[in-house]
Amino acid sequence: MKRRDLFKSAFAMGIGLVGASALRPLYAADLEEFRGPQVPDIAAIKVSEHCYMIPAMGDHPTPDNFGMFSNPGFVVTKEGVVVVDSGSSVQIGEMILRQIKAVTDQPVVKVINTHFHGDHWLGNHAFVAANPKVEIYAHPLCIENLKSGQDKFWFDFMQQNTNNKITGTVMTLPDKTFNGGESFTLGGVEFKIHHFGQMHTVSDLAVEVVNDKALYTGDMVMRRVANMEDGSYRGSIEGLTKMAEMNLTHYIPMHGKADGVALINEGKTFMETLYNSVVELYDQGLSDFEMKPIIMEKPFMKDVASQWSGYESTIGKFIVVAIQEVEKSLF
């Protein structure tokens, strides 16, 4: 199936949404007056010789930050640029392209979507518009989830939370797949693709830039408490253990700052503390609201995780998800 057969458009007009167009995508030149505002430029941060990230404008999507609440990344080589996650809208995708132009004249030749949450793929069409031959990759389960309704869910979620500022975004699904285990070389830079199983979602991809001893980790680790509903605690603990054993210099999350292996170890300790505590307290017959204050008094939670964005408001939801995983393991 051709990429343009996968295009769907949804525009906010007044208080309603206009339906999809499968014939050709509507774009800025067609409906300029219905297009959301341009996203302000955010200069890319150079993490290593080839690796860059563009820092988020906030921890959650809001009208003020245009939905720019994750860190798109890109890798510059002598034969083209590889983008890791395209942002929450076409406007963010265009802003990423402007920051790439400030660094290199090389075109974007590959886009890798780390998973199906909207801040990681909704900007795809900006890259197709800039280069119709661009290759857009994701795990097969990412594409499956998007085609099962997650595409529209995340479009609507971003529209609602930004007060329709992503209007003009054309939902453009990835059409090539990485299963994990693949490697390729571009412009003398070696890339390895990793899939550690279900962690943040079932479809998480991590992108290793071998030359730089760097790993783009998607949302599999972050100093942030936000969304575990599609994930697995036990899968996260296992996957983070493998990431730490890679002994890399740079771990680049899509939320928060890049760091060394301390980022991975903190993420693992958080998952272990929460999940193992829930297992213990569940065996004692405690409910979720009885567990919460006990878990929040655990040393790591009290001293470290309590400083993370979303901790106070979301830790209860994380406990509920952990209980569900414990119960599922019993059958």
Image: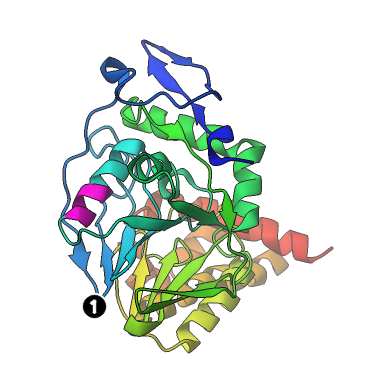
Q: Residue furthest right?
A: 331
Instruction: Judge by depth and name the residue closer to the eye, 256 or 322.
Output: 256
Element assignment for label 1: loop
**Residue 33 in view (yes/no):** yes
Q: Amino acid at mark 1?
A: Glu
- Does residue 305 sit above or below 132 in this rendering? below
**In this image, 331 relative to 305: left or right?**
right
Residue 193 located within the stretch drawn in magenta: no
Instruction: Magenta stretch: give its range.
Output: 97-101
Return the x and y of residue 293 as percentages of the image width and height.
48, 60
| Residue identified by numbered label 1 | 49
Return the x and y of residue 196 as percentages of the image width and height.
59, 72
Return the x and y of residue 308 as percentages of the image width and height.
33, 61
**In this image, 138 relative to 185: left or right?**
right
Instruction: Judge by depth and name the residue closer to the eye, 116 or 172.
Output: 172
Question: In the picture, residue 89 is in which quadrant?
Answer: top left
Q: How many marks?
A: 1
Magenta region's main secondary structure? helix
**In this image, 152 relative to 11: left or right?**
right
The quadrant in which the N terminus is found is: top right
Instruction: Judge by depth and name the residue closer to the eye, 77 or 263.
Output: 77
- Does residue 100 sit above or below 47 in this rendering? above
Name the residue located 62 percent from the left edge and 35 percent from the top edge.
149
Return the x and y of residue 25 as percentages of the image width and height.
45, 27
